């Protein structure tokens, strides 16, 4: 027995992170041969998209998979982009060193973050074929491209370099490439088709990155092309500071001990988002700390007290200290219309609805949920709906069952909304596809392979709400279609047959044909709306007409409302009826009187859109008599939209005032700011506008 | 545009592994507050069990959870063991440095391996409460215990130490503690009851660690105790060398470049398991490498050729080079009887069957599957069966759906075996619990939190086979019970009522009571077996009696076979009938003639077992007439057992010859060894013996 403890201890040693991930390469997504290839494509394409976005370049990406030795499953993968390139001296670290990167500490939405992905690809290639990864990189300020072969010394987590040099990078058209990166690696892997394939990964990537052009050459030499559907780059995301609501004691301790600030009031203002000068003072007061205390000299008890003040457990004047929400310019949602475009591009359907909810905050981390639902078309009616999961614009292709996004979908009783769902459990069945995208500064995956999102009660609830709202939209669409079909039948009957009978009768009786409008009105006894939304080739605008028929015996008065894609840049033109804007994307016209038998047409055009952007206008009414073909305005829904507007305005106001970089002597600038009223601290949970359309 | 590449590159920096895991603490199992506590208990208890096992100490573990501040969810956890302790100078690295440990490179079965677990607990505690972890450690060779508070500098992945000192460690009985470790940490966490709780974790741990004594004091002060049910320590596991079948090119390259061996034949013999001197020469020949080649000077093409020789793609004399399987003394299965004991201790049931399959090899990694099934008793009949998953004797409590072991259970059509399973999909329903344990030198988890096993076609097939075999056992048990119940009814009817009628009739007729045995035989027309297995207090042995009744009109001849727990140490005594061993754990007696109306009893006793170890004996027969209450011997089943015996003998022979440490001048010892015939290279896939019992 004696000495056993020493003996056991003697064998202990430090393991390099690269040895760890070499042994656990399945954590990184290198488990099966087919998944390994998808993982490699994913890491390379993610990097290309991230780099282009940061450099504000519209990405053009070429992916090529070649079978080198089919029997031994050796595959060569080349991914080329038109991004900014990587300076020669940085190449080895980016590709040959794990946990090396620029995005780990930045709080903002990005695809890659850990500095693991592409180095994992280099490592896996080397491990399975012994081959280094060939990198060619050209940056705009240099005439030639740097080329080098990169391997990985896993014992030390360091790159190994060989065949380093420079060469002229000519494009196919003979021109010199301005900037870009090309990565070529050779690995043991299998190329597959189907639901989990490189093709599917790129197709899904193109849905949520409509600004990217992607070309894929498969091992048979077939070329697959996903065009760019918008020239608009995703919003530029800014890094933000951590928010007090998401801080843990250990982090606060470290921030304080590393702080060079002279006093706590400065420290709080400068290192956190959401803390105004006034809030900083109130936090200090609540925690019973002098504002002049030097951060470095804070005592453990003071730190704990400050954390409690952050969390509202220690109060100021009997109330929790009000903090602003973190700014949301760190997020870059895809936005409703682009999701719709992306979905329509790849899946043929008849109805599409999408929704981008306003940003929300979970434990100090801003996040935003976007969802889309398409229905009908050629999709199979007896299979589970296709679930398209995305996080920070990256498709998630594995572990669907263990992912928060799937669980949110499964938590909805879809039978209420027109989809089949045996036992009200699991993914619903029907001719539909559901898209869900989480944009967040801190996406919590279940593992390094980034294929499933970990549990989070707040996020799941937010996704669920979006699903419910979309479900309601689908139900309304299906109900409206049914009702319209019925009314149309009746209408056609009356309009065609009644006059025919009248004419025939008149002929027989040799009397004049009677005026039937009164009779038709009596029989129909309804107000009907018909709307049309059509692309006008000549004017390059989208023309909308809304026709209201009064087939009742009384004069009617209404307010007619219609949606238009204001947030996506649609501009109202030729709106001869006037009216006024009721809320973001909702216009209203007052109809004083519409006499029995009369009809009236509201017309306008939408500028600033492309063909296919806007294909159906939702029409609402305010008034006592139902209008078939339009929906009664739900005032709560309108309030929600207005509430969202307010939240967005507040968010924008904050971005402009609070979150501009404060000058070092910011104490002097406090007064102006404190004069501003502070927006509510309650995180926004409201609904975003919902719009659907027949495709 | 110009300069953007440089600007982006300028922000890149190296991230410490501790920063990585602090940010991704959910990878380590610290996601929700309730799971964080279970994770902490798990890491501490796993370490205690591993250390005791290595030091060959029967573990006694005390776990205490105390609520420090219920409102703020602050909990203190103390785990104390009687393990070997940790030398003072090693404490800081073990607790305060990630990826530091002794087991990372060792190829053998162990609970912990990565050197992440307990440091993760220290990190999480510090992060959430700012408190360091208090460690008290006493090793046998020192008089006092070392005490120290450990924190973690996450920027550097280094421990921070404070309050270091030494103290006398007195146990409750006033004696000085000989050796052991006590870890106390304070963290933000929630104590919960139910299916995912500390209690459940410890209960499951005790099932698969029957040699451990575990005491748990919950926050209400209630004490839960799981006694030690065996004094036998798990088999000592030996580290093995990697097997050529599991080597990737990158690993081979590194092994060669780091080798100090003088020539390839030595390198191959010394650094791999399964490579005999002859095989080393053949591998060199197949790869067209001179045996004298210096490993360090191997060319890339030669390496590739050698790898192909490893994989049988390059041949020697037209055949793949035969390699031995890796030794399996690196594994430590729980073994059938102990699983049964563990299950019986914690779950009340009527029928239990367990099975330990022979070790198998997947890509050069030895692994072994053990399964158990209990049925009946108080378990709910209308709920899914309880699934108890384990890997290397550690309970898996989360992500059941995403785990290979669950998928293997779900792949079986349980309706064939007497359990309900709607749609033949998913976990079956019924009053049962299914246990499955994977022991492996390389357990592939889906993430660092070690809660679910990643996909592996070979392992899933092996588990599935074990499930099918168990299912067949369950079906036989249920069928036998049904048949026996029917026969018993008939038997009782005949034996009670017929003589009563005869007696009454004789009385009325005033005639002597007739001999009915002929009539009974005619009516029964069956051979019946009844067996009894009972603990004999006086002799401390298990007495078994097998009675055979011939209720047919003809004389019968049989071979009667019975199972006994030979592998678990059961020794046959007082076997007056003689007979002979047919296979491991199967004894046979020849019955030349059994006349009509006659019966016969075979008796024997089993020594070397404890009370409760063996409660039911399976009886089989060979013969043309069915014996109700016994099973017709399936000769294929017997062949399987014999095949397994052979495999085990080969495995043992290998352990003794090939895997004893070779002397440095091993080239000279080759001749003897080469004279031995080589066992087959085909990995063993046979069935293990199956035994069940009514509890």
Image (cartoon, coloured by chain):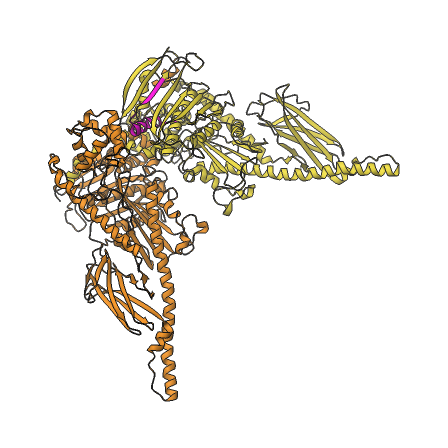
Chain colours: A orange, B yellow
Q: Residue at x 36, y 30 (%)?
A: B70
Would residue A34 be visible to someone looking at this image? Answer: yes
Task: Identify which residue is drawn at 29% across, 17% down.
Answer: B163
Residue A38, given in percent of the width and then of the height, sits at 32, 43
Does the magenta run of residues contain A14? Answer: no
B274 over A590 or under it: above or below: above
From this view, report whether residue B694 is shown above or below residue B89.
below
Quadrant housing the C terminus of chain A? bottom left
Q: Nearer the viewer, residue B97 or A600?
A: A600
Seen as rendered, the residue at the extreme top is B143
The total number of labels drawn is 0
Q: Residue at x 56, y 41 (%)?
A: B417
Residue B114 within the magenta-colored segment of the rendering: yes
Q: Can the viewer see residue B304 in this picture?
A: no
Task: State the residue in front, A48 or A421.
Answer: A421
Q: Residue A293: x percent and y percent?
A: 17, 27
Q: Quadrant of the N terminus of chain A?
A: top left
Report which quarter residue B117 is drawn in.
Answer: top left
The range drawn in magenta is B112-136
Q: On the image, which quarter does residue A613 sit in?
A: bottom left
Q: Residue furthest right?
A: B510
Residue A468's spot in the image, x, y percent? 35, 51
On the rendered structure, is B424 left or right of A118?
right
The reply, left or right, for residue A277 in relation to residue B202 is left
State which quadrant residue B325 falls in.
Answer: top left
């Amino acid at each position: 027995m004696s000495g056993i403890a020493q003996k056991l201890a003697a064998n202990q040693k430090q393991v390099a992170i690269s040895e760890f991930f070499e042994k656990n390469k399945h954590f990184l997504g290198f488990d099966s041969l087919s998944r390994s290839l998808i993982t490699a494509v994913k890491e390379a394409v993610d990097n290309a998209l991230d780099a282009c976005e940061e450099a504000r370049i519209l990405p053009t990406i070429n992916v090529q998979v070649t079978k080198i030795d089919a029997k031994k499953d050796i595959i060569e993968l080349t991914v080329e982009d038109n991004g900014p390139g990587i300076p020669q001296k940085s190449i080895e670290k980016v590709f040959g060193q794990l946990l090396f990167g620029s995005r780990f500490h930045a709080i903002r939405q990005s695809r890659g973050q850990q500095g693991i992905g592409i180095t994992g690809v280099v490592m896996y290639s080397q491990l399975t074929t012994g081959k280094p990864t060939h990198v060619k990189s050209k940056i705009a300020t240099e005439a030639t491209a740097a080329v080098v072969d990169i391997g990985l010394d896993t014992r030390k987590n360091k790159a190994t370099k060989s065949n380093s040099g420079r060469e002229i990078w000519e494009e196919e058209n003979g021109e010199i490439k301005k900037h870009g990166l090309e990565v070529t690696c050779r690995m043991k892997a299998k190329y597959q088709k189907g639901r989990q394939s490189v093709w599917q990964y790129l197709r899904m990537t193109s849905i949520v990155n409509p600004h990217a052009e992607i070309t894929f050459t498969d091992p048979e030499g077939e070329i697959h092309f996903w065009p760019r559907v918008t020239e608009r780059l995703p919003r530029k995301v800014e890094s933000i500071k951590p928010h007090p609501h998401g801080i843990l004691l250990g982090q606060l301790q470290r921030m304080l001990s590393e702080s060079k600030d002279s006093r706590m009031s400065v420290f709080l203002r400068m290192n956190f988002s959401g803390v105004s000068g006034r809030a900083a003072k109130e936090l200090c007061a609540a925690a019973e700390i002098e504002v002049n205390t030097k951060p470095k000299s804070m005592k453990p008890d003071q730190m704990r007290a400050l954390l409690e003040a952050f969390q509202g457990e220690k109060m100021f004047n009997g109330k929790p200290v009000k903090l602003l929400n973190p700014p949301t310019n760190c997020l870059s949602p895809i936005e409703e219309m682009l999701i719709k475009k992306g979905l329509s591009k790849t899946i043929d359907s008849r109805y599409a609805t999408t929704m981008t909810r306003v940003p929300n905050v979970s434990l100090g981390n801003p996040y935003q949920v976007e969802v889309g639902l398409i229905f009908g078309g050629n999709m199979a009616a007896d299979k589970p709906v296709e679930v398209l999961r995305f996080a920070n614009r990256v498709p998630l292709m594995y572990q669907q069952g263990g992912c928060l996004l799937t669980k949110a979908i499964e938590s909805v009783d879809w039978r209420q909304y027109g989809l089949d769902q045996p036992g009200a459990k699991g993914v619903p069945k029907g001719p539909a596809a559901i898209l869900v995208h989480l944009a967040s500064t801190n996406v919590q995956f279940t593992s390094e392979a980034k294929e499933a999102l970990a549990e989070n009660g707040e996020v799941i609830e937010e996704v669920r709400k979006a699903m419910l709202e979309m479900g309601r939209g689908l139900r309304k669409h299906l109900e409206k279609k049914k009702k319209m079909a019925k009314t149309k039948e009746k209408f056609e009957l009356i309009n065609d047959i009644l006059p025919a009978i009248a004419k025939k009768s008149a002929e027989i009786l040799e009397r004049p044909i009677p005026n039937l409008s009164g009779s038709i009105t009596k029989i129909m006894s309804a107000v009907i709306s018909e709307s049309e939304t059509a692309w006008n080739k000549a004017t390059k605008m989208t023309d909308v007409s809304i026709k209201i028929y009064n087939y009742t015996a009384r004069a009617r008065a209404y307010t007619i409302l219609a949606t238009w894609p204001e947030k996506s840049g649609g501009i109202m033109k030729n709106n001869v009826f006037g009216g006024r804007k009721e809320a973001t994307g909702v216009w209203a016209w007052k109809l004083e009187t519409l006499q029995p038998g009369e009809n009236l047409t509201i017309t306008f055009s939408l500028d600033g859109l492309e063909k296919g952007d806007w294909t159906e206008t939702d029409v609402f009414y305010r008034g006592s008599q139902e209008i078939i073909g339009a929906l009664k305005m739900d005032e709560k829904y309108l309030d929600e939209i207005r509430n969202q507007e307010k939240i967005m305005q507040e968010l924008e106001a904050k971005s402009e005032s609070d979150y501009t970089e404060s000058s070092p002597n910011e104490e002097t600038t406090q007064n102006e700011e404190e004069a501003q009223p502070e927006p509510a601290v309650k995180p926004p949970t409201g609904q975003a506008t919902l719009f659907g359309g027949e495709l």
